[in-house]
Amino acid sequence: MKFLCCNEAIKHLTPQERRDEAYFMSLLRIAETTCGLYYSYVRDLTLNLQRASKLAAGRVHKPLWKQADPRFVWNKNLLEELIEAKLDEFIIPLIQGSFQSAQFTLKDRPVRITLFSRRCNRRLGTRMWRRGANLEGATANFVETEQLVEYEGLTSSFIQVRGSIPLLWEQIVDLSYKPRLSIIEHEETPKVVQRHFHDLSQRYGEAIVIDLTDKRGDEGDLSNAFAAEMGRIPGVRYIHFDFHHVCRGGNFDNLQALYNQIEEAIHKQGYFLMNTKGEILLEQSGVVRSNCIDCLDRTNVTQSFLARKSLDSQLQRMGALLSSESISLSDNINDIFKKLWVEHGDELSLEYAGSYALKGDLVRYGRQTLPGLIKDGMSALSRYYLNNFHDGVRQDALDLISGYYTVSQGSSSPFHNGGFESSSYLPVASAIIVGGITATTFTLSQVGRNAQHLISSIICAGLTVGVVALVKANGKQFCSRPRLCGLI
């Protein structure tokens, strides 16, 4: 992806406008590095198989952008002028998400399984700067995941969705490893939850909500608030499952306890199935909506567990497996399936958090391994750095290209506030802290030779502690923050 400057008017900008233009262009350069974008010249990727199969005959012959579900068109804002100019041949909808596909053999016949995820554009953003829902009920990191299975002319589709807890809440970075969660008190909160689940039921049918958050601490407070609001939503089943508590020790198989609670409802919802003639044999009548805090690691492990159960049912219905058989009986097929879901989780995590997913071992092996712990540690450090020192700018880039922020000529600069960028002082503060620790250590080692070194050690230690306290007290000011738009 490349953004090209075609505006001759920039030659006549004021100095402040030139600075603004340079920053906006830097945001577009960040947008150019966006990962997980997919497109097709012949098929509408925004629609799952069940919805696509029900398109009116005339609609199939319309341009792709007219068929598309606008929720999943990542470049929707960028296409508007092309649409106004009726340049249909040049309009290619992009989706952001994940695509993995693999093939294996059952009964000497090929089976193809494809994972296809679509990220919603209604609350597009980064991990820490887009949490919860907006006032319209659209949630951060809302993703529709479709598991497609093809065997002997039959094609089956199983849909799951994930999305941030649909309340108004935030988690502002402040240099701590796990910033405090804060629920925003707002009179519209009940309506926000209602709007979200009304939209969900209109699109997918009956919903089962699985909340995987902890029951203690800040997560517990948020989970309790979510449960209280869900008690007011009729026709939606809410289940809390403390993933960290039940699956402690990395025991993935303990998710069976969750599945036992919803097995009957999932079988009732079913999956979509059609034959080579395009005749619909079965339809999926509902959806499971999973969430944790980020809707990444715990959510991906849980969705992969439910997807494996569905895959067994799909293959049994297609005649590839007997009713008593499962893909878990074949190490080769089971490994292929797990690899798909691990890669799927990594891709979605890179798009939202900027790092690979955690807990990949639970999907791949059903338990935590030492190499997996090391990889999770590196990913966690990467998330910490990106969330604190980079994601504010990345959020601005997303707000700009999605049209959430609109540049208007003649308006005041969004960057000219007369203050200073506290983040620019972080390297200086870091250098003082490191230098102070080094000097303190060195002077302490010399105390036995010269008593004056003790005074020097105390001064260096005091300076270091003071700078550390200053940075900690003003942690939010030292982090990368969005400058174009608010949080809701």
Image (cartoon, helix red, strand yellow):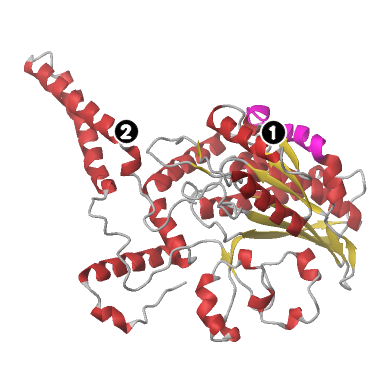
Whether residue 450 can be seen here: no
Which secondary structure lies at badge 1? loop
Give yes or no for residue 254 being in the magenta stretch: yes
Q: Which residue is mark 2?
A: 472
Asked if residue 363 is positioned above or below residue 139 in the image, the reply reads above
Residue 184 as seen in the image, left or right of residue 44: left
Q: Which mark is residue 40?
A: none
The residue range painted magenta reads 245-262
Whole-percent x and y of residue 458?
16, 20
Q: Which residue is mark 1?
A: 241
Which one is in front, 3 or 154? 3
Mark 1 burial class by Cα count in 10 Å: few <14, some 14-19, many 20+: some
Mark 2 residue type: Lys
Residue at horizontal 44%, vertical 67%?
Answer: 32
Q: Which of the 4 quarters of the picture holds residue 251?
A: top right
Whole-percent x and y of residue 95?
60, 66
Q: Which of the 4 quarters of the picture holds residue 114?
A: bottom right
Residue 393 as seen in the image, left or right of residue 90: left
Residue at horizontal 63%, vertical 68%?
Answer: 70
Mark 2 burial class by Cα count in 10 Å: few <14, some 14-19, many 20+: some
Whole-percent x and y of residue 353?
50, 49
Residue at horizontal 27%, vertical 29%?
Answer: 469
Whole-percent x and y of residue 295?
60, 45
Which one is in front, 341 or 280? 280
